[in-house]
Image (tube, rainbow, N blue to C red):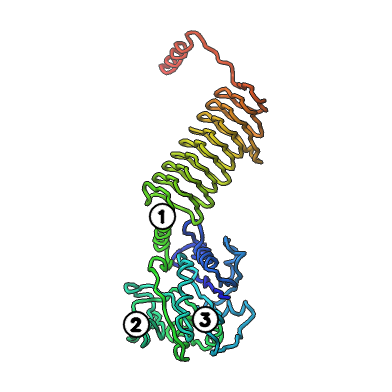
Amino acid sequence: MNSAIILAAGVGTRFKSAIPKIFHTVGGLSLLDHVIHSALSAGLEDITVVLRPGYEAFPLKFADAVSFAYQSTVKGSSDAVKCALKSQNNLSVEVNCEKEPFCNNFEWIYILYGDIPLVTPETLQALSEVAKICEKTAVVVLAMNSAHAKELGKLEPAAVAGTIKGIIEAKDASAFVETIPLCNAGLLVRKDLLYKLISEIKPSPVTGEFYITEIVRLAYEAGYVCRYYEADAAELSGVNSRQELAVIEQYFQNRMRKKHMDNGVTLVAPETVFFSFDTTIENDVIIDPFVTFGPNVHLKSGTHINSFCVVEGADIKNAAVGPFARIRPNTQISENAKIGNFVEIKNSLVQKNAKINHLSYVGDSEIGKNTNIGAGTITCNYDGFQKHKICIGENVFIGSNSALVAPVEIGDNAMIGAGSVITQKVEPGFLAISRTPQRNIENGSIEFRELKSKKSRQ
């Protein structure tokens, strides 16, 4: 069983935020949740997240899938790993260097960073494949090109191509050491050797911190092989500021756009469409420019989302939405339904062939098949204290500028006259009209204008 430790106890002072850095979001999911999700998707078990005390107050989507350890005093990444190992109640693992190769016996621990959110399950699995090259492999470093990043440490090459003997942290690089332009973005360490060697890590003479990257040097000096696997720099980019967060968001959105287009989705202007981490879209969906998806959106084949829509928490089946529509959580829109411009829908079911074409609000409602909701219609679902439900049957016609006051039920084939305020049940097939009677006053407009003109002269 391969396990993981995710280091997430950093403060992120450059964010200037009351929210710790790792809880800021990309694609609607926290940085830390992204890393946890990738670890889970790679099949890793026994995942321990190292946090600073107090961070437990911030929500995590995948909290139930991991355990937590807490680093009360920041002493460096090696100390954080020790906190995780102690939380597992096991700091002693037998070291047996005579075991058979990786794939049969050795257990490994991934050491990942909570502020490198875009690492993929495929990359994590690739590290495992590199570790199988030689049974003397002790560490595989997940590396990215850092030629232009002076603040990042570099890998020291060993004599054999593809192997290394150490990692020089940028703060400690006071003397010249031969390095290659790659830096550490994560580690895969043989579990037994990690337990044996971590206590030998000494503090940096420059910073006083205990670096987990020193495990490479210790393993190399003990006669083991240390390798690296280079992945795409965008995938392994870290987040230390809001500017870098914006760059990571761009990387993530580009990844999502490519994924959906590769799966048969038409994005008319891809750079203007923004996805959540969990947006699922079937093939033959068309998305026009300037559309934003929040969490938990599912679009079935044949759906067309027109421009300037915001959709979150919705299941849409072969329907047309927008332009300028807002679809809020717990909404289901069925086949061939039409949701038009400046329509807002929340917590509602819109059945097949229903139409809500203009300037309407529908909340906590069920709209039956083939029903037409006229322009300007609103459902009055909130009485100031509680939400109430509105049920509208099939083949119903709601005249424009009507207000439906919940709780209320409108039966199949009923009609509502334009401008009505409906507060009572309308039986199937009935016509309901609720208006103040119209009065036409002869010469009324002339008298009104004369009165206003007279007052303006006084």
| Image: 187 above or below 295 | below
- Dot in front, 1 or 2: 1
- Residue sitting at x 32%, y 72%: 148
| Image: 248 above or below 288 | below
For label 3, the residue is 102
- Residue sitting at x 62%, y 22%: 432
Residue 209: x, y in percent?
Answer: 48, 82
Residue at the extreme top of the image, as rendered: 442
Mark 2, Cα crowd under 10 Å, few <14 / some 14-19 / many 20+, is some
Instruction: Pick the residue in front: 74 or 202.
Output: 202
Mark 1, Cα crowd under 10 Å, few <14 / some 14-19 / many 20+, is few
Tell whether 84 sits left or right of 284. Answer: right
Residue type at mark 3: give it: Phe
Q: Are marks 1 and 2 in contact (CB under 8 Å)?
A: no
Residue 406: x, y in percent?
Answer: 64, 34
Residue 27: x, y in percent?
Answer: 47, 57
Residue type at mark 2: give it: Thr
Check residue 179 in the rendering and tell me which mark sits there, or answer none: 2
- Dot in front, 2 or 3: 3
Mark earlier in primary sequence (1, 3): 3
Residue at the extreme bottom of the image, as rendered: 222
Q: Secondary structure at mark 3?
A: loop
